[in-house]
Amino acid sequence: MEPKLVHVPGDADIAKALNTASHGISEATHKAHLGLWQGYANKTNEIRKALAELEMDPAKANQIYSQVRALKVNYAFAYGGYKNHNVYFDTIGGSGGPATGDIATLINEAYGSFENWQKEWKTTGIGARGWAYLAYDHDEQRLFTFMGDAQDTYPAWNSTLVLALDVYEHAYFLDFQTARAKYIDAYFNVIDWDAVNARLKKGM
Ligand SMILES: [Fe+2]
């Protein structure tokens, strides 16, 4: 059976994100970043094709090394990276500022105020090696800010990712060198809360 393939992003997919240039996150950063995002999409598709062709033979599976292990472990990294970047690029390029709509209500319920959440988001972003994730936990019906060290760590099941902050250095080094806190301050000015609310609504 032919595997379903993911959309490989192009220039149109970063068009809105280019609006961040006026706040210091440059077009050059996003254009270079697009190449990495495309890499996650292409590798996702490559692994899907390889899995479709792999003979699923339990006798050949091995937890130390086997083809199924190599493909499945790296699939989580490739597809995870694809999804993370989908959310990152979809939720920037807006007018930033305090949250609006349903997400504002949920942030207040979970954190008491937007400022409290902002502090947690920035602290999480600085403490992470890769990502800060804002997700709606369907089991507890509330938001939670998760930390990610890689493309495939550490979200929890039954949550909808509504906002993702890339803190890998490729996301900001060109513009801020190692000053990640300044990048996150700039990021707060470009969050697209309408896009976050649309993701929330879709996931409900
Ligand atoms: Fe990235």
Image: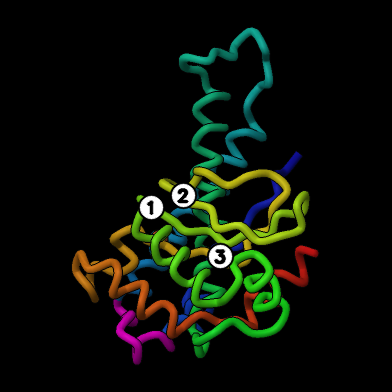
Quick check: 80 left or right of 107? left
Which tag, 2 or 3, sits closer to the chain's start?
3
| Residue tagged 1 | 128
Disc 2 residue type (three-letter): Gly
Quadrant in which the N terminus appears:
top right
Distance from the alpha carbon under mark 3 to that under mark 1? 19 Å
Residue 104: image location, x then y, percent: 65, 78
Picture quadrant where residue 176 is located: bottom left
| Residue tagged 2 | 148
The region drawn magenta spans 19-28
Closer to the camera in the image, 133 or 152:
133
Closer to the camera in the image, 104 or 45:
104
Please tell me whether residue 174 belongs to the stretch shown in magenta: no
Dominant secondary-structure state across the stretch colored magenta: helix
- Residue 159, compared with residue 89, is above or below; it is above
Tell me, yes or no, whether the two marked residues, 2 and 3, touch with CB atoms within 8 Å. Answer: no
Quadrant in which the C terminus appears:
bottom right
